[in-house]
Amino acid sequence: MKHVAILGSTGSIGTQALDVVKAHPDRFALYGVSAHSREDAFLALVQAERPRRAVFSRPINAAVPGVAFSFGEEALCDLAADPQVDIVVLAVSGIAALMPLLAALRAGKRVAIANKESLVCGGDLVREALRQGGGELLPVDSEQSAIFQCLQNGRREEVEKLILTASGGPFFQRKREELKDITPAQAVKHPTWSMGRKISLDSATLMNKGLEVMEAARLFGFSGDEIDVLIHPQSLIHSMVAYRDGTVMANLSRADMRLPIQYAMTYPERVPSPARPLKLYEQPSLTFIRPDMDRFPALKMAYFCLKAGGGCPVVYNGANERAAELFFAGELGFLEIEESVAYALDGFVNRPMTGLDDILAADGEARRLVDAFQRTRSFT
């Protein structure tokens, strides 16, 4: 029996992780949960599931028999490192996941990670935490899980390319001039996946795929020249690995995040899952399109940041997070998300990231640069 802590329990990944836990009561027990917002949903979850520990981002009036409540970032990190926890499902969004990730790895936990921002921004710190604590880091993102599974078919030196697939989001077939007036409601209407608001927006801009290029480099030790992206609108092939002998290994399944979540929790075993099996004869033809880097500047900027190193990946992520907030608030246009990230990268003087303070400083600078960009616009 493995005790599980789900950090970010009220979001899309968190709720699906709970589905996996409940589908295997002989394997998993829910020990702890956390949430940043959605207080009512969080309290309903705690009342229904009765975990041992519950952490909310700020103090709230909460009392459930048998449940120990605590609040704030320190409590979140303490839950991630709790000696009773075997598996941490990290579904916290944004760079806020970095501190609990480090705490869990230093404590030797298996971390099923659904947060790419912490790896993009703190890759060196994550590697050191893994070395110190002897923990495990298993990807939950469907693309990185697919790469992880396909890499088990050969040695590192036998790999030619990692091939990340992208749905392309809802707008990849539209001309750029048609995207100027896209609304938040349109941007989060993903054609194949059911995801949270921020990641759905990132899929529409392809910022998400840019982050995944950098994430794959951090997770698997490949350079940008060894990572390709293909648009695959059907979202059945989640990613591929091309080997030097000409073989391409692909991972296929329905668009159901419970599959990669469960695999990260049960690895190296494969067990029955709550997801419906894929029947290829029921599926449409599979298509693949090479992305136009000029059409998708977010992807082009990601390759630049990966090669430049230093604080550029941190700025890419921080600027995008802030631009997304402004877009949802109606203060930036859809195309201005990419423009504001480019503005932040142009205004940032790149430098090495020697520790957490450097990372947080670069992240804050990126957000201030986006605010400066927004003040120069006349968007209404």
Image (cartoon, rainbow, N blue to C red):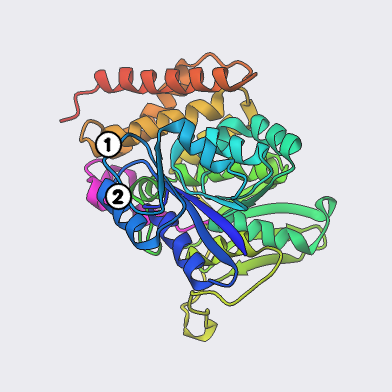
367 sits left or right of 289 in the view: left
Identify the residue at the far top of this view.
349
Percent coordinates x, y for residue 355 in the rendering: 62, 20
Residue 170 colored magenta? Answer: yes
The structure residue drawn at horizontal position 65% and vertical position 35%, both measured from the top left corner, is 126
Q: Dividing the image into 4 quarters, which one contains the N terminus?
A: bottom right
Percent coordinates x, y for residue 159 in the rendering: 78, 54
Q: Is residue 99 above or below residue 246?
A: above
Query: Which of the marked residues, 1 or 2, is nearer the chain's N terminus?
Result: 2
Which residue occupies the foreground of this view, 302 or 9?
9
Which residue occupies the foreground of this view, 198 or 288?
198
Which residue is denoted by mark 2 in the rendering? 187
Q: Is residue 345 above or below residue 266?
A: above
Q: Which residues are magenta?
A: 164-188
Res. 255 visible in picture: no
Which residue occupies the foreground of this view, 287 or 188?
188
Residue 202 colored magenta? Answer: no
Mark 1–mark 2 contact, CB under 8 Å? yes
The structure residue drawn at horizontal position 58% and vertical position 70%, both measured from the top left corner, is 252
Percent coordinates x, y for residue 117 in the rendering: 51, 38
Which residue is denoted by mark 1 in the rendering? 327
* Cα–Cα span, label 1 and label 2: 10 Å
123 sits left or right of 357 in the view: right
Res. 358 visible in picture: yes
Local crowd size for mark 1, using a 10 Å CA cut-off: few (<14), some (14–19), many (≥20): some
Task: Kindly identify the amino acid type of the residue bearing the numbered disc 2.
Answer: Ala
Local crowd size for mark 2, using a 10 Å CA cut-off: few (<14), some (14–19), many (≥20): many
Task: Kindly identify the amino acid type of the residue bearing the numbered disc 1.
Answer: Phe
The structure residue drawn at horizontal position 44% and vertical position 29%, both measured from the top left corner, is 318
Task: Kindly identify which numbered label has been placed on residue 339.
Answer: none
Helix, strand, or loop for circle 1? helix
Percent coordinates x, y for residue 371 in the rendering: 31, 21
